[in-house]
Image: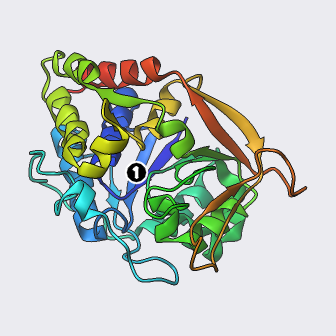
Amino acid sequence: MKFIIDTDPGTDDAVAILIALANFSDDELLGITTVAGNVAVETGTTNALRILEHANRNNIPVFKGESKPLNRDLLTAEWVHGTDGLNGVNFPIPTKSHEEIGAVDFIIDTLHNSSEKITLCVLGPMTNIAKAILEKPEITSKIEQIIFMGGSAKHGNTTPVAEFNILVDPEAAKIVLDSGTNLIMMGLDVTHQAVSTRERLENILNTNTKTGEFMVGLMGSLAELEIVKKKFPEGTPVHDAFVTAYLVDNSLTSGELVNVEVETDSLLTLGQTVVDINNISGRKKNVLWMNKVNDEKLFEIVTTSAKQLP
């Protein structure tokens, strides 16, 4: 398997990246591309470099991506992830910089020149991916699958109906969902089924590793938010971890092939992912919508990953 991580780190993004670093080689993880979302792209790019520095994987290149959505002002989530994006978790200062080539050009060039298909793991808004597809539509033939965290069939976490990653750039999400590629959706319907309970955090901490300490800091930092306490009294979801954990073990989640469309016009429902669970619309089924998870397996992957990194 060869894959690229596209991300806006982000506390849960950081956990997802650490899982990938623990389980895949430099020949498999081709690069990390960053995008504006949870934080500004400059902060997110620094965070990607900090995570690689901690894992002693600086040879994996980082490419700075788009600083704003395709057609909208940027919406960020520092109120969730902190002004540094990592809620003060003490990842080291990076000793390297991002590459000179931008994220969109890297995605285009890598797909265009690859002799085999490549998986895209999308942990944030889809701006980079959409822009690459708009510039060079032919690259979709080189995409093995796009596994993305975003959307929901029932409810939102930023508006009553919209999940954050989709809401930030709904036009980009629409382009990706209409691209004809193999799409796997890890939305709130599935990510809310696995939470980082105190027992699970203690198991991770008991690995006695710096990575385990960082993971617990990243996941535990969200538990004090009032909105999180009310909805998840036992612990918080770790949304983006689903994407890379699925690469480790694709029996982690299961779902149904359905049609998913994105609302881009309505002020009331902007960013909503309309998931045709009952196949009412007659539209083409374009997304494998995940709706069940083995939650114990997810945290087994997280805990094992904590042990595997230096």
Q: Which part of the image, by quadrant, shows the C terminus?
A: top left
Q: Is residue 292 left or right of residue 285?
A: left
Which residue is located at x 52 percent, y 84 percent?
71
Q: Quadrant of residue 184?
A: top right
In this view, 20 is above or below 74: above
Q: Is residue 27 left or right of residue 216?
A: right
Q: Residues within 10 Å of mark 1 (few under 14, many from 20)?
A: many
The kind of residue on which mark 1 rests is Gly
Which residue is located at x 30 percent, y 34 percent?
233
In this view, 207 is above or below 288: above
Q: Is residue 21 left or right of residue 291?
A: left
Q: Is residue 127 left or right of residue 309?
A: right
Which residue is located at x 87 percent, y 52 percent?
280
In this view, 216 is above or below 218: above
Q: Which of the colour schemes (rainbow, by chain, secondary structure, one colour) is used?
A: rainbow
Which residue is located at x 63 percent, y 59 percent?
273
